[in-house]
């Protein structure tokens, strides 16, 4: 079955450490996204990528970094510069680029990150 | 930047009652999408509205897009326990993708 796989499901980090969240899709989608969701809140866009080797900052990119070396993969690194990283992180993908970014987004199951 | 406001934040209903959530944008939207997130799950796409004044139905769910393309609503008739979850609207943010509302949490009392 096609889909989006996020790993791990739960992640614990010590303060001062960087940590990388994995996101892989086999839907052949061009666009991929990272969102952060805090309890009772909506989804806030961290980074998105419309094509390989290109990505753009979203609303809350500070303290995060991404790469898009392959179409299928869009890993997110939460750096030590992110002061409040505890949250639920969701990866999504969609078809289309640019003006065609109206397509539905398909989400992974998410990664819950906690600070020890 | 573009903001998408969604109300109410929480809605408690008795099973069998109707439910409505409203979404308002500060700017005209090219389209609006609706998602449902079950407790502990991830958002799942429900529908997309594109045309001014558009109305779409999915069984007990009715989706509307305002004439000015700045507001939208989702109405559920005769709620069931399977409707529990958070309903998000999401509007197109220029050329960059979607801006999500904060969602409406639907709690159903049997």
Image (cartoon, coloured by chain):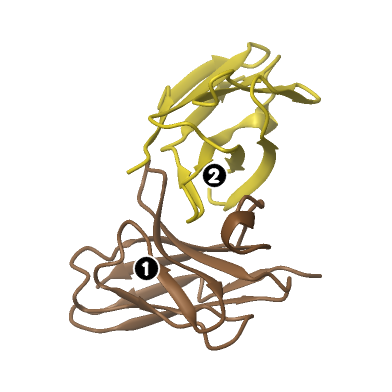
Report whether B11 appears left or right of B17. Answer: left
* Residue beneath the point at 37% across and 43% down: A41
Within the image, what quadrant is residue B99 found in? top left
What is the residue that sits farthest to the bottom in this orientation?
A69
Closer to the camera, A62 or B26?
B26
Report whether B83 appears left or right of B99. Answer: right
Q: Position of residue A88 (x, y in %)?
A: 41, 59
The residue labelled by disc 2 is B39
Within the image, what quadrant is residue A105 found in? bottom right
Q: Position of residue A113 (x, y in %)?
A: 37, 68
Closer to the camera, A75 or B78?
A75
The chain carrying label 2 is B
Q: Position of residue B43 (x, y in %)?
A: 58, 49
Closer to the camera, A65 or A39?
A65
* Residue beneath the point at 49% across and 19% down: B12
Colour of chain B as rendered:
yellow
Gap between marks 1 and 2, in whole Å?
17 Å
Report whether B74 appears left or right of A46. Answer: right
Query: Neighbour class for label 2 at 10 Å: few (<14), some, many (≥20)?
Result: few
What is the residue that sits farthest to the top in this orientation?
B17
The residue labelled by disc 1 is A113
């Amino acid at each position: 079955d096609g889909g989006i796989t996020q790993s791990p499901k739960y992640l614990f980090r010590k303060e001062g450490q960087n940590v990388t969240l994995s996101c892989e899709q086999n839907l052949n989608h061009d666009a991929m996204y990272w969102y952060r969701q805090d309890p009772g809140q909506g989804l806030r866009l961290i980074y998105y990528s419309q094509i390989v080797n290109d990505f753009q900052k979203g609303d809350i990119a500070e303290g995060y970094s991404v790469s898009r070396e392959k179409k299928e993969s869009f890993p997110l690194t939460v750096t030590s510069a992110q002061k409040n990283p505890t949250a639920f992180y969701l990866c999504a993908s969609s078809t289309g680029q640019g003006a065609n970014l109206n397509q539905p987004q398909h989400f992974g199951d998410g990664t819950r990150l906690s600070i020890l | 930047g573009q903001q998408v406001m969604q109300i109410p934040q929480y809605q408690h209903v008795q099973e069998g009652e109707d439910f409505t959530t409203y979404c308002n944008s500060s700017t005209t939207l090219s389209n609006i999408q609706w998602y449902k997130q079950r407790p502990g799950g991830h958002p799942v796409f429900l529908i997309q509205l594109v045309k001014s004044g558009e109305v779409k139905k999915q069984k007990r769910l009715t989706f509307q897009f305002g004439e000015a393309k700045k507001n939208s609503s989702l109405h559920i008739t005769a709620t069931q326990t399977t409707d529990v979850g958070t309903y998000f609207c999401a509007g197109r943010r220029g050329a960059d993708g979607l801006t999500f509302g904060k969602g409406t949490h639907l709690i159903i009392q049997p």
